[in-house]
Amino acid sequence: MSDPLQQSQDSPEPELAPAPKPDPEPKPETPKRRGAKLWTRDFVMGTIVNFVLCANYFMLMVVMTSYALNVYHAPASVAAFCASIFIIGTLVARFTTATLMARFGQKRTLAIGAATEIALTAMYFLGASLPLLLTVRFLHGFSYGTCSTATATIVTAMVPPERKGEGIGYYMLSVTLGAAMGPFAGIYLSNNFGYEVLFAVAMITAAISVPCVLALRRPAADRAQAARDAGAPVAAHAA
């Protein structure tokens, strides 16, 4: 007979169940990073500047052909050119504004352009001759192109990089609102109150841009340019 003790020694030992793994310690929640501020004073002021100048542009554009026909008795093609020559001036300004900003600074270029917009809008009151109207329209388009380019440069530079798309989208609403309100105001005022009232409202609208431009902080590019200009004589003297 086999020994029971020997059998118990020869039998395999039962496998032990693996010990349960301890629950991992919960990781502390990392605080969510708050997005950089978008609606700063400078962003709001720059957007308002673009809105009022766009409104001024569209307010006059939609009535300029009828104005040239009714007041100057211009041929239809010339009357239409009185409206479209504004766009030619704007196009020319796209190629020259970068040079102006590099020489005079972004904010100063915008301030001069805004003041010029007011002066040129006031010149519509003169009503001297058709060639003068064409000249004023071209210069008005040039000043508008200068202002819109300078404003876009200043505003896009101050938008936080992580909110660039959102910021530019909100900024471009100023163009949309100006295009929506300007034509309505232009046609309504000219039909109900006359061209002189229209020009006065357009001039006041453009004038709103001046205090907004002055409220803008000096752009970083202007400060850097001023620092380089201040250091240039020192560097030349040291050499």
Image (tube, helix red, strand yellow):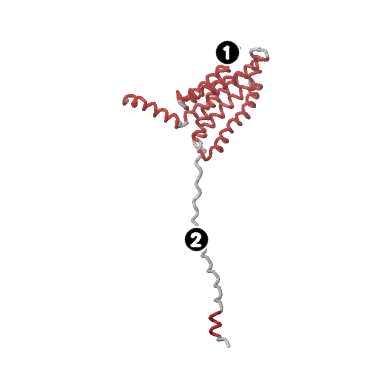
The N terminus lies in which quarter of the figure? bottom right
In x, y percent, where is residue 186?
63, 24
Using a 10 Å C-alpha cutoff, classify the residue at mark 2 as few (fewer than 14 neighbours), some (14 to 19) or many (20 or more).
Answer: few
Horizontal relation, residue 96 to residue 198: left or right: left
Note whether 208 is above or below 134 in the view shown: below
**Farthest right residue in view:** 76
Which marked residue is nearer to the observer: mark 2 or mark 1?
Answer: 2
Q: Residue at x 60, y 29 (%)?
A: 178
Q: Residue at x 52, y 33 (%)?
A: 156
- What whole-number distance in Å separates the C-alpha atoms at marks 2 and 1? 81 Å
Q: Earlier in the sequence, mark 2 or mark 1?
A: 2
Q: Residue at x 52, y 40 (%)?
A: 162
In x, y percent, where is residue 100?
48, 23
**Farthest bottom residue in view:** 1
Q: Please tell me whether mark 2 sits on a helix, a strand or a loop.
A: loop
In x, y percent, where is residue 163?
53, 39
According to the picture, the residue beneath numbered tag 2 turns out to be 25
Quarter assignment of residue 79: top right
Note whether 166 is above or below 108 in the view shown: below
- Would you say residue 121 is visible in this rendering? no
Numbered circles on residues, count: 2
**Farthest left residue in view:** 238
Choose between 27 and 14: the one closer to the eye.
Answer: 14
According to the picture, the residue beneath numbered tag 1 turns out to be 132
At label 1, the amino acid type is Leu
